[in-house]
Image (cartoon, rainbow, N blue to C red):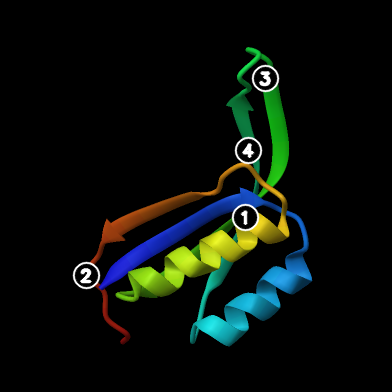
Amino acid sequence: MKKFEIFTEEKNREEVEKLLAKKVDGFTLTFGLGYWISTRGETCKENSLIITLLTNEEKVVRSIAEEIKKMNNQESVLVVETKVKGEFI
């Protein structure tokens, strides 16, 4: 099993939730504040949304990330993939 995290700006949350509900069986949303250095050397910040998915469907995750990127008019979103061992008890 793999854990995928999609890091994006917290925009269009209802639409993002609808997209996720159509594409995957379950997900977790975590809210935060993201910081980065712009190409002009300026410190920037934005409200962030981290979407956590447990799946082996990499293509589905990448398509979700692409759709969110377009939906939020972002230059990029970050997708992190981690191998995990988990079980429901």
Mark 4 lies on residue = 34
| Residue type at tag 2 | Lys
* Eye-nearest disc, 3 or 1: 1
Q: Secondary structure at mark 4?
A: strand
Q: CA distance from mark 2 to mark 4?
A: 28 Å
Instruction: Give the amino acid type for the residue marked by disc 4 in the picture.
Output: Gly
Q: Residues within 10 Å of mark 2 (few under 14, many from 20)?
A: few
Q: Amino acid under label 3?
A: Thr
- Camera-nearest label, 2 or 4: 4
| Residue beneath disc 2 | 85
Residue under label 3, please give it: 43
Q: Is residue 74 above or below residue 16?
A: above
Mark 4–mark 1 contact, CB under 8 Å?
Answer: no
Q: Which residue is mark 1?
A: 69
Which numbered disc flags the more N-terminal residue, 2 or 4? Answer: 4
Q: Residue at x 62, y 55 (%)?
A: 69
- Amino acid type, residue under disc 1 in the picture: Lys
Instruction: Point out the tag, 1 or 2, that comes first from the N-terminus.
Output: 1
SS type, badge 3: strand
Q: CB under 8 Å between callouts 2 and 4?
A: no
Q: Which of the image's four quarters has the N terminus?
A: bottom left
Answer whether labels 2 and 3 touch (C-beta < 8 Å). no
Q: Residue at x 70, y 26 (%)?
A: 44
Residue 54, image x and y in percent? 38, 73
Q: Nearer the viewer, mark 4 or mark 1?
A: 1
Instruction: State the separation of the CA atoms marked 4 and 1.
Output: 16 Å
Tell me the distance, in whole angstroms, between the alpha carbons under discs 1 and 2.
29 Å
Q: CA distance from mark 2 to mark 3?
A: 37 Å
First in sequence, mark 3 or 1: give its number. 3
